[in-house]
Each structure stands twice: as C-alpha cells, then as structure tokens.
Image: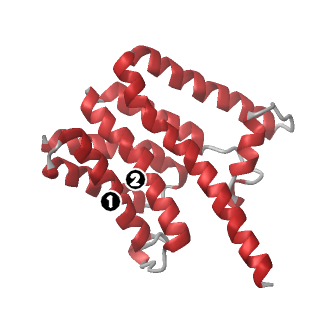
Amino acid sequence: MPQKSSGLVRGMLKAELTRKGFHLLIALVPSLAAISRSNTALLLLAGIHLFMCAEGLRFLGFSPPLVSSVTETVMRKREQGRFVLAPITLGLGALLALLVFPPPVAAAAIYALAFGDSASCLVGKFLGRLRPAFLFGKSVEGSLACFAASTLAAFAVFRCWKTALAVGLASVFIDALPLGDYDNLLLPIAAGVAALLTQ
C-alpha cells in the first residue's frame, strides 16, 4: 500500500511539474514582446486559437496529435470529462497584460502569472499543511511562495521594493480567491494595476 501511495504521489508530481513547466513558458512573452509586441500578441492569439480548436476536437471525441496527448498528460482529476480552460486563460491573461500595460508593467504582471502562480501551486500542493478557511482550501505555504516569487520577479523589473511588494500583495490576494483557472486572467491584471499605482 505505501508503494502504491508513493507511486501515486510521484505520478501527481510529474504531471504537475509538466503542467507548470508549460505555465512557466509564458515568462518568455516579455522578451518576445521586446523584439515585436504586435507579433507576440499575434503569436499568443494563434496559440490560444490552436488550443481551443484542438481541445474542442478532443472534447468531441477526436484526438489531434501532440496537443491532445499533452493535455491528457497534464490534466487534473477535476478537469477530466471537461473542456480544459487553463491554457486559454493563461494565454489570455498574458495577452491582456501585454495590450493594457506599458512594457515594464506588462513584464512584471506576466512574471507574477508565470512564477507566482506556479510557485503557489507547487509549494501548496506538495508542501502545504496550513489551510485556514480564509484561503478557501489553499495553503499558507503556497500563498507565501506566490508572494515571494511575484515580489522578487517585480523587483527584478523595477528595482523598487515598494512596487515589488505591491505586486506581490496583489498577486497573493488574487491567488487566494477561489477562482479556479480564471486566476490566470485576473492575477496579471491585479499585479499590473498594483505596479502602476505604486510607481
């Protein structure tokens, strides 16, 4: 039984690390935008559209190669039998930040999405023990990881602790809400607004 349990944990860890590996790729968006903002926006739109089409086909019983196999590998238990929204909201969150905010603010917002959200999920899922009611099932450890990662990423952009801390607080506030995959949309917007208000 313990072997079965540890195998299950290893499988969950592998799937979550793979999932968050894809999530972290969104951190490339600010670098690509520095070369061409419009082309990066088009690339994000194309990626969102491609995934939506592939996921729609998978949901209808067809299995487009590559996209469907990757989706099935990283799919969480609660997503089985459902349209997987996370990659779409992730792409849309980065796209909104890119279109709404000036470049440094957009970069900090997208880094909060990439690093803060990933740190929260991984630390919370595998190391989280303290789960007070006000965090809606999430852990204190995961929230602290989100705050630390978002704050450090914002400090790397702005070199200002006041702005970095504001981004970290905004990120952890959104991350703590029971939003499901929609936190990918709201977290970068909240982080960007916090950065704008404190610069």
Q: Is residue 134 visible?
A: yes
**Picture layout, residue 168 above or below residue 1:** above
Q: Where is residue 19? Give x, y as percent.
A: 61, 49
Q: Which image quadrant for residue 192?
A: top left
Q: Which residue is mark 2?
A: 116
Q: Where is residue 81? Give x, y as percent.
A: 77, 51
Quadrant of image for the N terminus: bottom right
Horizontal relation, residue 141 to residue 65: left or right? left
Q: Residue at x 41, y 71 (%)?
A: 141
Q: Quick one: label 2 or label 1, which is nearer the N terminus?
A: 2
Horizontal relation, residue 148 to residue 49: left or right? left
Q: Residue at x 81, y 31 (%)?
A: 64
Amino acid type at image mark 1:
Phe
Q: Is residue 173 visible?
A: no
Q: Secondary structure at mark 1?
A: helix
**Crowding at label 1, few (<14), some or many (≥20) Cα neighbours within 10 Å?**
many
Q: Which residue is mark 1?
A: 147
Amino acid type at image mark 2:
Gly
Q: How is the structure coloured here?
A: secondary structure
Residues at marks 2 and 1, CA–CA distance in whole angstroms: 7 Å
**Picture layout, residue 2 above or below residue 39:** below
Q: Where is residue 28? Give x, y as percent.
A: 44, 33
